[in-house]
Image (cartoon, rainbow, N blue to C red):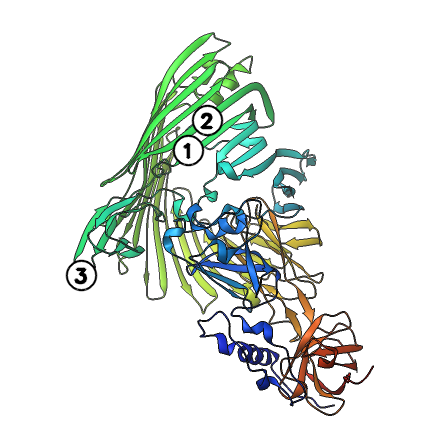
Amino acid sequence: MRKIRLNPVAIVCQLYCLLHSSVLFADESETEFDASFLRGNEDLSIDISRFNHKNAFVAGRYTDVEIYVNAEKKGITDLIFIEGEKKATLCLTPHLVEIFDLKPTAYQKQEKQECIDAEVAIPEANLHFDIANLKLELTLPQALTEKRPQGYTSPSLWQDGVPALFVNYNLNHYRSYLPSVGTTSNTYLGLRGGMNFAGWSLVHTGSKSWQTTKAYTDFSSKYESIETYLRKPIAPLKSELTLGDISTSGDLLEGLSLRGVRLVSDDRMLPSALRGYAPVVQGIAKTNASIVIKQNGYTIYQINVPAGPFIIDDLYPSGYGGDLSVEITESNGEKRQFTVPFATLVQLVRPNQLKYQLAYGRYRHGNELYKQNVFQGTLQYGLFNNVSLNAGLSKTENYTAYLAGIGLNTPVGAFIADSTWSDAYFINSKKRYKGYSVRASYSVKLPVTDTYITLATYRYSSREYYNLSDTLVANNSTFIDDRVIQSRLYLRPKSQYQISINQSLGDKWGTLYLTGSTQTYWQSKRKNHQYQVSYANHIGRLNYHLGFSQTRDLEHRKDTAFYLNLSMPLGKQHYAGTSYSQSKHYQSLQANLNGSIGEDNALSYGIGLSTAKQNYRAINANMAYSSTYATFNGNVSQDNQKNRQLSTNLAGALVLHPYGASLTPALGDTFAIVRAKGASGAKINGLYNQQIDMFGNGIMPYLSAYERNYVSINPEELPINVEFSATQKEVIPKAYTAMLVKFETSINPMVLFAVQTDNNQPIPLGAEAFDEDNHLVGYVVQGGQLFASKLDKPKGNITIRWEPTKAGMCTFYYELSTLAVSEELKTYNVQCKQERLNEK
């Protein structure tokens, strides 16, 4: 027996290219091969008639095929090919029509036939199936396909997951020692778990805490159930349905906690280009023209259009501001340019787009469930390109509130304004109050100064305006009425102003940031305000950050603080820094060293020293480690006044799925179970320190719902003869699903047979080899060599066929020393017994 090294992939590629080379550039549908090129001798030949037809392959089901229409990827699906008169033909199903995005006039329908020949049904199409790469390419006139926005995925490709149980846990322990109090310890356990099944997701959130002190009695709280609900995506409505403990968004009306039902539009079901607000760009091209759209000097969109009017309505929203510069280049070189204003706030929606939220249920306040049922609904509609309308209603017993508003996108920024009218009746005092609350917001980017005013909001509420929550609390109490709510016990807002400005001064001069807010109340003449100014820049590798802040509460207590932070990198993963802070009652100087070490930077650390007034000194250290199964954090500190502190945190998740149980550091609402049996140690790409465990399972903790996600594994750490059918797969999950992503693995025994017939003649090139179960195990290549890559038994018979008759085949017996994992290719010389024509 001799040992050689041979690349099996190269062998297969040579064979494939040899068999297909004469049709790569052929225009005819049929091409005849000269089989003599493949003969080992004049007496032996091989049947290659199936390769006479262009793009020929065996009929059957092909899984996970990539679909391309006019070079644009549409998705991955299964294809069915049926036997035709001369070759296998593609079965055009309604599911495939939807993936192709064909217009009704693009294909011929046939009654009472679930499967029709695609080439016959779409006469103007050119179909090519690349069987080696499992890739189907469809080319046809653009006018026969539906125009889709960027990021569109067909709803028929959205995938349901598999049943799974999961729980996220967060276990935190804090222990401190103060000379005046003694030792105190607190332990907190937070849980968020549930189950995914049949398109539904059951979620429960709860917590429990324990406290131990030297001076007081030990305390253990009851398990607190925070919320429990069922949720399900409703694809036809592009919405999400939730049953149980729900919360409403506070974007327009007051945010509420209810126990009931909620239906809310889900922007994630929209193509990515239609999420959020962006204006429609319209114009007229005189000739076939190129349209380039820029924002802040960057090209964000480019398309070629024919002569005539054009509409671009699938721009990706970009930040809070930056007008759009539209440049039209005609075919004769003429250039024209115009500007479309663009600023956005959450209340702006695209033209003809409708967003809504409908909720109904009993009001929840902490752990208390009120008897009154509450309805709340909001609507947002894009009336025109730059105008959005907003409306809302809150209704319960003895309370009604209406909202009406408008959003405007103008050349000088985005504005929204709305007003809410309330009608509240207080049972205890038998008084009715009707009031109003007005709000206005503004957002803009000033291009000349490069200033971002990301949010400026003003709200004013009249004295008679009451929230729904205030009214319900009063009407469900025997001692709270409108007079109590009007007292200082309940501070009802009168007016509020907020502003946030980000000013870029260029690469040389850094960034200036300002934020501030002021709020007044009806029960007090005093104001509550705070503001902060900061400046950041660098000198070489030294980064510095200056900050100043001031707050004033309702008791006229003012606190002014100043801080300075310096940091510098020490290599790639380590940083040293110092910070100084000072306020009226506090002064501190700190020095610290931070960084990360180990593979994938799984271990991070920090060490700090600090000093303060009255000769106070302290030292602290922290460490965090992210493993395949959980994340651990710990920190410890001690000062010169004998105060000590120690805290630890363990966080992660457990998933129960069809193949067992898996641990992971974190878990999102939509995730993937990665199954690769026999691939223990293979890393899951894109994640820190995540790999396939000893049971062949792993977790991809976060997936984007309704979008293409690519889950892949890296087999570099595995033995060379562990083979995968694929190392990357695409999934498009629905929200709140557990996707099962399976990678088929096998152990290749890496055996090469040098085969000759029993009369010492070589086997014809391209002959197929089958095991005793009639499974294909390889092809014969030059010199009668057979690379057997699918053997699963250490001994047995292999049959080689080059013609359909018995005379065109031979059989040999093999017996291998091992099928174990190995990195060496072993070669065996064998004789293949051929049945003679004159033998009976």
Query: What number is the disc on residue 377?
Result: 2
Q: Which of the two labelled residues, at mark 3 and mark 1, occupies the earlier sequence position? A: 1
Dot 3 amino acid type: Gly
Q: Mark 1: give few (<14), some (14-19) or many (20+) Cα within 10 Å.
A: few
SS under mark 1? loop
Q: Is residue 163 left or right of 394 when viewed as pictured?
A: right
Relative image position of residue 70 (x, y in whole percent): 41, 59
**Which residue in the protein does label 1 denote?**
251
Which of these two is toward me, 685 or 125? 125
Dot 1 amino acid type: Asp
Quarter of the rendering containing residue 459: top left
Q: Mark 3: give few (<14), some (14-19) or many (20+) Cα within 10 Å.
A: few
Q: Which of the two labelled residues, at mark 3 and mark 2, occupies the earlier sequence position? A: 3
**Tag 1 near tag 2, CB within 8 Å:** no
**Tag 3 near tag 2, CB within 8 Å:** no
Alpha carbon of mark 3 to alpha carbon of mark 1: how far? 47 Å
SS under mark 2? strand
Residue 262 in view of the camera: yes
Relative image position of residue 773 (x, y in whole percent): 77, 69
Callout in the foreground (3, 2): 3
Q: Quadrant of the C terminus?
A: bottom right
Query: What number is the disc on residue 333?
Result: 3
Q: Mark 2: give few (<14), some (14-19) or many (20+) Cα within 10 Å.
A: many
